[in-house]
Image (cartoon, grey):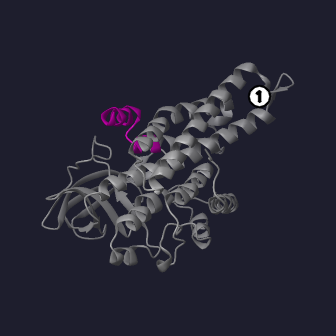
Amino acid sequence: MEFALEETQQDVQDLAAEVLRRESGGGDGTGFDEGAWKALDDAGLLSLAVPERFGGAGLGVLETAIVLTEVGRTAADVPALSALAFGVLPVVRHGSPQQQEALLGGKPLTAALNEPSSPMPDEPRTAVENGKVSGTKTGVLDADRAHRLLVSATTSDGPAVVLVDPASPGVALHRTRASSGFEWAVRFDEAPAEPLGGAASLADLHACALAGICAVGDGAVAGALALTAEHLRTRHQFGKPLAAFQAVAQQIADAYIAARTLHLATLSACWRLGSGLDAAEALDVAAWWLAEEAPALLRTCHHLHGGLGLDITYPLHRYSSLIADLARLVGGADHRLDALAARA
């Protein structure tokens, strides 16, 4: 079994890492680092999955996930998760040629998937009737910047995805506080809606969203672990580096195992999704591991940093805040475990 990235994928990873290392860090705390975002766009990293006829590279899920992992690794303040996993991938996979031409020209997209007390429901309470959508969505990322919202809804033909202009009549945006910044609750009151793809599009939108969330979480965990390992290597007590103490070594070893497992689970799920295989169970496993193990791993990283981990000028808090938001977006560990049990 070969788990190494192919040459093109490795090039994507190297380029994304270089761009973000050089450009990230100028965010304004509202979810947008303009310099890093422009640099990613200029490097062609935001259009990897866009078909070549629309100016993209014609690549797929795994290459997009690689970029999102590097975004997570630097905890960059850019809307890559919403734009790519919640927007570009579903439109590429299910949009009509006319929709692809209209939406894949660099216009920001996002998806409204979660409902109150119901993360990513298979049968949304949000409903479409006579071409108008009504309902409430929570935890919507970057709704204020989006050109279109991909909204999960129930239609007369069953669950589906519809496109809604957030500036159209009948759409109300309410900003809410998240751990790592802000997100939005969106209320639809007979807002005009346009169908995206067929009945299978909702399940695939959920799959793309989970793949993107896990990819960002994989990167965030790796970034936090690298930061912690460097601190333990360079910080000394009693004339020895902290990493030399047995209790510390045991804790960082456990954290490494958890991070490695999340990475392999995410990589496997994204590969399956991008290859056209059934990825539902693999995505549930990766999402459960993210929600169950990643928050505990970040608590270990904070503990091993001591007081420095609580310093607002030190970057570790950006990773723990990001992980907290991602774990909540997938519904938490119990919800993901229930989803796995239902499949069994």
**Mark 1 residue type:** Ala
Q: Position of residue 203 (x, y in %)?
A: 32, 52
Q: Is residue 25 left or right of residue 158?
A: right
Residue at image location 43% in from the left, 68% down from the top: 108
Q: Position of residue 272 (x, y in %)?
A: 47, 50
Residue at image location 31% in from the left, 59% down from the top: 201
Residue at image location 21% in from the left, 53% down from the top: 126
Image quadrant in which you'd find residue 110: bottom left
* Quadrant location of the C terminus in the rendered image: top left
Residue 58 in the magenta stretch? The answer is no
Q: Is residue 6 left or right of residue 233?
A: left
Q: What residue did someone put label 1 on? A: 243
* Quadrant location of the N terminus in the rendered image: top right
Instruction: Please report the bounds of the magenta region as a residue range.
Output: 326-344
Say if residue 145 shows up in the picture. Answer: no
Q: Position of residue 11 (x, y in %)?
A: 67, 62
Query: How many discs appear?
Result: 1
The one nearer the camera, 16 or 76, is: 16
**Dominant secondary structure of the magenta stretch?**
helix
Q: Is residue 253 left or right of residue 263?
A: right
Residue 330 in the magenta stretch? The answer is yes
Q: Position of residue 321 (x, y in %)?
A: 52, 42
* Circle 1 crowding by C-alpha within 10 Å: few under 14, some 14–19, many from 20: many
